Image (cartoon, grey):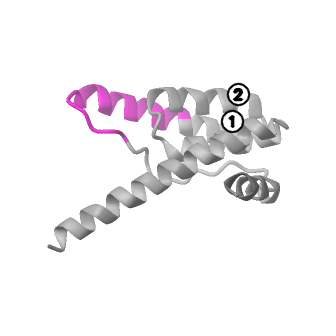
Amino acid sequence: MLENYTRNLLKNLTSKYFINFNFGANMKNNKDNKNNNENLEKAIYYYKKGVEVGNKGDVKKALEYFNKAIELNPFYRDAWFNKALALRILGRYEEARKCLIIGMSIERYSNNKNNKKSEDNGK
């Protein structure tokens, strides 16, 4: 069922422009905040570069930038979504589908985590 859903999403993903969602990059909290902040800044930089070069037509270079952003922050949902778009444009549909599923999983995890915080604050 999820496989059919993501296939339909990819088929309907007709945008030829990369999107700068501008929601920021979710970073998993751990003890080393300085490294997290540096990685977050670098991930955002590579993500924005990917959007920029992708919208200028260099999809392969954009894919490289999205991969660097994801390498620095594997929980960067927006980078996963734009990586899926780049792969779809390049005709690499199965890889695009997998990236879309990862992005949706991160989004679902983030939403569940935020909902739990809201519930905890309401008590």
Q: Position of residue 25 (x, y in %)?
A: 43, 44
**Badge 1, how many Cα within 10 Å: few under 14, some, many 20+?**
some
Q: Are marks 1 and 2 in contact (CB under 8 Å)?
A: yes
Q: Does the stretch in magenta take in 93?
A: no
79 w.r.t. 62: above or below: below
Q: Nearer the viewer, residue 87 or 48?
A: 87
Region of the chain picked out in magenta, as a range: 27-46
- At 67% from the left and 40% from the top, the residue drawn is 98
Q: Quadrant of residue 92?
A: top right
> Dominant secondary structure of the magenta stretch?
helix
* Residue at 38% across, 29% down: 39
**Which residue, given by chain and number where applicable, does mark 2 sit on?**
61
The percent coordinates of residue 77 (x first, y second) are 51, 46
Q: Is residue 14 left or right of residue 74?
A: right
Residue 101, x across and y down, in percent? 62, 47
Which residue is at 52% across, 32% downward?
70
Q: Position of 94 compared to 102: left or right? A: right
